Image (cartoon, rainbow, N blue to C red):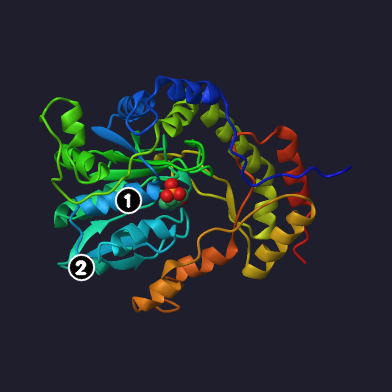
Amino acid sequence: MENIRVDFNRPVPLGNEYEYMRQAIESGHISGDGDFTKKCHAFLESELGVNKALLTTSCTHALEMSAILLDIAPGDEVIIPDFTFVSTVNAFVLRGAKPVFVDVRPDTLNLDESKLEAVLTPRTKAIVPVHYAGVGCDMDSIMAIANQHNIAVVEDNAHGLFGKYKGKFLGTFGSMASQSFHETKNFTSGGEGGALLINDPVLAERAEIIREKGTNRSRFFRGQVDKYTWVDIGSSYLPSDILAAFLFAQFEQREKIQRHRKNVWEMYHAALKEWAGKNGVQLPHVPADCEQAYHMFYMLLPNLELRQKFIMYLRERGIYSVFHYLPLHLSDMGQGFGYKAGDCPITENISDRLVRLPFHNALTGSEQEQVIDAILDFSFA
Ligand SMILES: *Cc1c(COP(=O)(O)O)cnc(C)c1O
């Protein structure tokens, strides 16, 4: 049988995307904070129960806003899991902070909460947990340590929209959380996009100002001031309403998207469980108190050589699988901050072994069958 090409990711419209983009254009308001942006804000605020949601041009920019809102300054230290995307750390380094990398747990690949106390100093300003693969970090422990030492928590929830920890939505624990609507995430705003969720109401008004080039333009439009002016530092973090139109159409398909992703995840897990056990492959672990967001399906192969062979083997069968983050502490930037090999051994180990299988909103049953059949035929010899 001829193999079909199975993409790792394929962003697709699922409902009213084209219609809403057309409506946005015809409305005559396609810059930021138009009707569809407001609909997206209201949706996130009511579904998640957050104080305020603001769409941004990316998750990277939402993280940058959070660093400005916390007044991060040179000399401050910010605790980041070693296994994450560069934006999680870059947003704080841009403000002059020193990144303090903490290793991850070998079971969930999330920030290891048991290693937090040892790295706290009087200069620690923030902890930025990442809910890897949409599986919640141990937020009880992280929030307890943060509250005891008066340290802010910003959740990088790029993977975790609609996931829960102990029945409460991810992104609602810290004073703020970032979301990504990049084309590789569960929901996309047509390629690039993000949001800042603000749980601490004290931060809400300043967040609007920072997002609007440091002006009080949002208050002006609400009639709260009679002209708008430069009141703070800031930048242009608001996306076009055309992107919000695309995103709102995806939000409307929330149930369908999450149901599909759950099915894909459970199909991989059921089909590969026995094979994984026999071959020393570790499948994702979801703690009992977590409801995951079904962002990805990853596996840990026994070692780097087998992981590389596995990716090549699938590629020859038209199947596109990928590895993920490299340890931040070993990057050029990480080494520039004084880190060296051995500082975060779990991340060094799992980063070499991790592979992500094709996983997206349009993956078909026959594509998934082709992936599973190929995996079951892989030779570990
Ligand atoms: C995707 C991602 C980001 C960046 O998202 P953008 O919207 O592309 O800026 C940040 N953190 C994590 C954990 C991500 O997966």
Q: Position of residue 233 (x, y in %)?
A: 19, 51
Residue located 50% across and 49% down the image: 285
In this orientation, which residue lies closer to the viewer: 244 or 286? 244
Q: Position of residue 214 (x, y in %)?
A: 20, 46
Q: Position of residue 147 (x, y in %)?
A: 17, 51
Q: Residues within 10 Å of mark 2 (few under 14, many from 20)?
A: few
Residue located 16% across and 30% down the image: 220
Q: Which quarter shows the C terminus?
A: bottom right
In this orientation, which residue lies closer to the viewer: 330 or 242? 242
Q: Residue furthest left?
A: 225
Quadrant of residue 230 in the image? Answer: top left
Left or right: 100 as drawn, with respect to 221: right
Q: Residue furthest right?
A: 1
| Real-space Cα separation, disc 1 to disc 2, in angstroms | 17 Å
Determine whether the beta carbon of the residue marked 1 sits less than 8 angstroms from the nearest atom of ligand 1: yes
Q: Which residue is mark 1?
A: 63
